[in-house]
Every structure is written in C-alpha cells, then in structure tokens.
Image (spheres, rainbow, N blue to C red):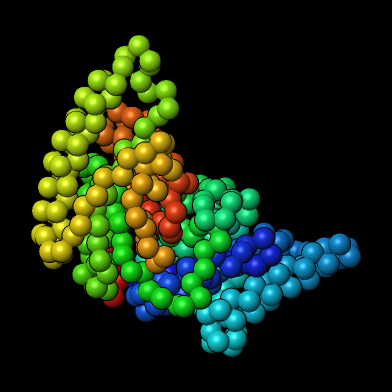
Amino acid sequence: MRAVVGYRGGDDGGEALALAVTLRRTTSADLIVVAVLPLVSDHPGIERVDLEYRTWLAAVAAEARVKAAAVLAAGDPAALDFREASSTSVAAGLVDVAEATDADVLLLGCARTATRGSFLMSSVADRLLHSSPVPVLLAPHGYINEEHEPFASMTCAFVGTEQSREALVAACDLAVRYGTRLRVATFVPRAATMYPPEVGMDAEDMVSAEVAERAVRLHEEAVALCRARGVDDVATVVGRGQGWAGALTSIEWGRHDLLIFGSSRLGQLARVFLGSTASKIMRASPVPVLIIPSGTTTWST
C-alpha cells in the first residue's frame, strides 16, 4: 500500500503523522509526505519581498520535513520520502501527487479549530471528499498513537446503497489482507423535533420497529457480502441516538478503531431521519475515518 500524507507543519498539527504511524503499523504502507506550497512565478522579480517570500517557503518545507522525519523516520530526514508540491490549492496538489505515485490513499489531519477528539472539515478535506480519485483517511483533532499500535478493528457504515457496498468490499479486502476485525454498523440518528407532541410515543415505537426490521435485512445482506469476500467472522451493530453524534457514540469504540464509509448520500434509511450526507457522519465520528469514493475498491500490493 502507498499513502500520500499531507503535512507542511505550522498550522498542521501532528494528527496526520500519528495516523500515518497507525496506517504503516497496520499495513506496512509506503509513506510519501507532501508539503503543498503556493505557486511562485518562474520569473521572480528582484524585489526584496519576493526573495523573502521564497526564503520563507523554503524554511516552511524544511521545518515540515524535520518534524515529519522525527515521527516517521527516526529523526533521519534523508530516510523520509518527503516531497514539495506547488499548486493553486492544497487539495489539487495532493491529488496530483497521489495520481503521479499511484497512491492508494490520501491522509490528512483536521482543521485547527476542531475540538479535541472530533472533526471539523477543513476546506482541503471538503474539496478532497468531492474530488479525490482515491480513498481519503482523516484524523480527528488530538489523535495520538504513542504505542504505535495498528488498527484493532474496522467498522463499516452500511445502508444498502451501491456506494456503501463498495465501501464494504474495500473494508473486507483490508480485513482479509491485514487480519483486522470487521464490524458492520447501521446508524440511525434521531432529530429532537422528529415527533411533535400531538403525535405521541406510539409513532416513535412504530418507526423504531420499522428501523429494526430494515437493519436486520441490511445486516443480512452485509454479512453475506462479507462472507463472499472471505470474511466469515463479522459483527453487526445498530447505533441509535440524538443526531449523528448520539448515534455514533451509542456504540462502543476502541482506542485504535477505524470507521469506513462511502462518500455519497447514505440511502433511504438515513434520509428517513435526517437526509444527511457522509460529511455529517465524519464530523461526529470519535475515531479516524476512511472515506471510499465510488470505484476505488482495489488496493495495491
């Protein structure tokens, strides 16, 4: 496996590097750390400000390389595959490197304004979720892996759409290859104003029964798909709670778990409740997330 890690120091915290450690510990992935910097004219002026700007960019890249090497290459910058890329946007620069290197995944940290243990989708991640040709792996704010442990378990969100099937196929292939435990989850967020007082609790009971019945059918399909892909031991779970955060935190998560899902709308079951997109699940996830774009279910050796 080959992973492109977006990191340029400064405002980029250490979460991306920590998650890169986890990925490499799990998959022995080749890591390519990329610092995407603004484009600079090939015909610079002689003004002092232009020279100072170029000098500053060089210092940013050099510092990022040293920091990344400290985490990923035992403090030896020469042993780190570190690259600088110039682009009009960070997302475009990362995609260019991913395509040029036949990377399997793009790995990022989160926005600096996110609260610890949660995501706040940055403009870079937002663009990648809509444009990346390869899966995107995102770390929540405050993510650490001081023990350098691998992923212990993967949970794949499944709602019966073609996109969620592709994500589950990708998860199964990873589970088979790396011996990671796999769990299939259906999340049912409940809106605070879903049931008007005049409707009464009977309506909620009816909807709960319908959801439970749908979840059983979904999980039967998911388990059959997993077994067809070589995963015989797969757990299933339904997460229900107030909003996406309540639904996701209603199930147990380990310290080194990973959530996997497709990058498009989550299908009829989700639309019954909130009509949410995968980005809302990502924001509520207490663990790193791997988003699988349609058509990217194969992994390199």
Q: Position of residue 234 (x, y in %)?
A: 18, 60
Q: Residue at the location (41% across, 65% down)? A: 255
Q: Position of residue 42 (x, y in %)?
A: 71, 64
In this view of the protein, which residue sits in the foreground, 55 or 24? 24
Left or right of residue 203: residue 53: right
x and y, in percent, of residue 41 in the image = 72, 61
Q: Nearer the viewer, residue 118 or 39?
A: 118
Residue 109 visible here: yes
Residue 169 seen: no
Q: Residue at x 33, y 29 (%)?
A: 273
- Asked whether, in this view, residue 47 is left or right of residue 93, the answer is right
Residue 199 place in picture, x, y as percent: 31, 14
- Residue extending furthest toward the front: 201
Q: Residue at 33% x, 69% y: name it.
A: 152
Q: Tell me: residue 107, above or below residue 276.
A: below
Task: Indicate left or right for 144 with 277 as reference.
Answer: right
Extreme residue in the top direction: 198
* Among the 4 quarters of the image, the one containing residue 190: top left
Q: Residue at x 21, y 69 (%)?
A: 176
Q: Nearer the viewer, residue 149 or 85?
A: 149
